[in-house]
Image: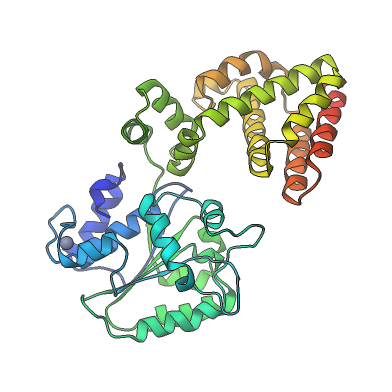
Amino acid sequence: MKFSEIPGQRETIGRLISTVKSERVSHAQLLTGPEGCGNLALALAYAQYVSCENRSGVDSCGTCKSCVKYEKMIHPDLHFVFPVIKKDTDPVSDKFIDKWREYAAVSPYFSLTKWLHYIGAGNAQGLIFTSEAAEILRKLTLKSYESDFKVMIIWLPEKMHQVTANKLLKLIEEPPEKTLFLLVSDEPDKIVPTIISRCQLVRIPSFSPSDLSSYLIEKFRIHKGRADDIARVSNGNIIRAIELCENEDSSFQDLDRFRSLMRYVWKKDVLSLIAWSEELSAIGREPQKRFLTFSLHLFRENLMMHLGQEKNGLVYLTGEEEAFSVNFHPFINEENINTFVEEFSLAHSHIEANGNAKIVFLDLALRLIGLFRR
Ligand SMILES: [Zn+2]
């Protein structure tokens, strides 16, 4: 992808381009920032820029032989390492490379959860397994085919098995010639410190709300007010912003469900609560988890509102949510917030562990009655 396709992050892009201009491309770089800062997109655009045969001072050309292959992520000198699941023996990234190209081509802004869902992980954990170590070594000892640089993009090195990390460390310490390692991380504090110390750090900030808003308007054809709302709520996290746009209807539904739950709890209307849990139990496990996560978000934001943080711009609610919270926030305070968070988190983990949804939700609802009574 070209730099120009990334909505914003001009400062970081400028820094990356200047390393090429001044011929000081560090052979191992760690691109990191808060989740949804676009680090994978930046790594892809940077790799394409470095390898472009006809780059300008601001971007890759997008049309040369190298760029065409980079756009499809099929360049023979471009290698990927990312978390996968164990389907048979020796799980390695290349067994999932077609899916990876398909998925990242649609949008380079996605979370590990989304990626794992795409490859049908179910409850399996995504990891960079020990079997990947031999693959990395094999790929990097190959001669480069077509360009000056061989590039290896490692997405989420924090998910790397210790044995693999040690092999990688050796490679970074004594790199094969003309090799560029781009590590793309959301949680650098979980990476082996010796690896970090060998990498040039590229810190990336969150997207600015105005850049994000313009992107949402163009991509989702939503009106400016709504786009501004979502950009603010997602706090510069482009992954979250996209999810909110895609789940536009479901977040209205979730607010509706939350509103009903609180109304029945307040009235101690057990019959309605039973009906409510039955309805929730029928929507499926992923939407159930989403509803619980949404509720946690509402509780936190209502506490912020209660603490008067609105004027400091620390409350991230959409118009609809805010309208509800104006009346709801007096009930949330520092005393009870932890119990609410615990109850909803507990329900979330029970759902995740395949607990009986009807029981989980009814149980949650009945406990809430006790909490509001205090
Ligand atoms: Zn090019």
- Give the image location of residue 286, x and y in percent: 64, 43
Residue 89 in the figure: left or right of residue 262: left
Q: Is residue 243 left or right of residue 276?
A: left
In this view, 265 is above or below 134: above
Q: Is residue 203 among the parts visible in the rendering?
A: no
Residue 216 found in image quarter = top left
Residue at left 51%, top 19%? 319
Q: Closest to the observer: 150 or 304?
A: 150
Which quadrant does the C terminus fall into?
A: top right
Tally of marks: 0
- Image x and y of residue 178, in percent: 27, 79
The image quarter in which residue 98 lies? bottom left
| Quadrant position of ligand 1 | bottom left
Scheme of image coloration: rainbow
For the question of whether residue 30 can be seen, the reply is yes
Q: Which residue is rendered at x = 57% and y = 15% of the image?
A: 323
Image x and y of residue 114, in percent: 53, 51
Q: Residue at x 45, y 73 (%)?
A: 94
Which residue is found at the position 45% from the left and 30% from the top?
A: 230
Q: For this view, does 297 lie left or right of residue 1?
A: right
Q: Quadrant of the N terminus?
A: bottom left
| Coordinates of residue 329 in the picture (x, y in percent) | 67, 19
Location of residue 283 with respect to 17 vertically, above or below: above
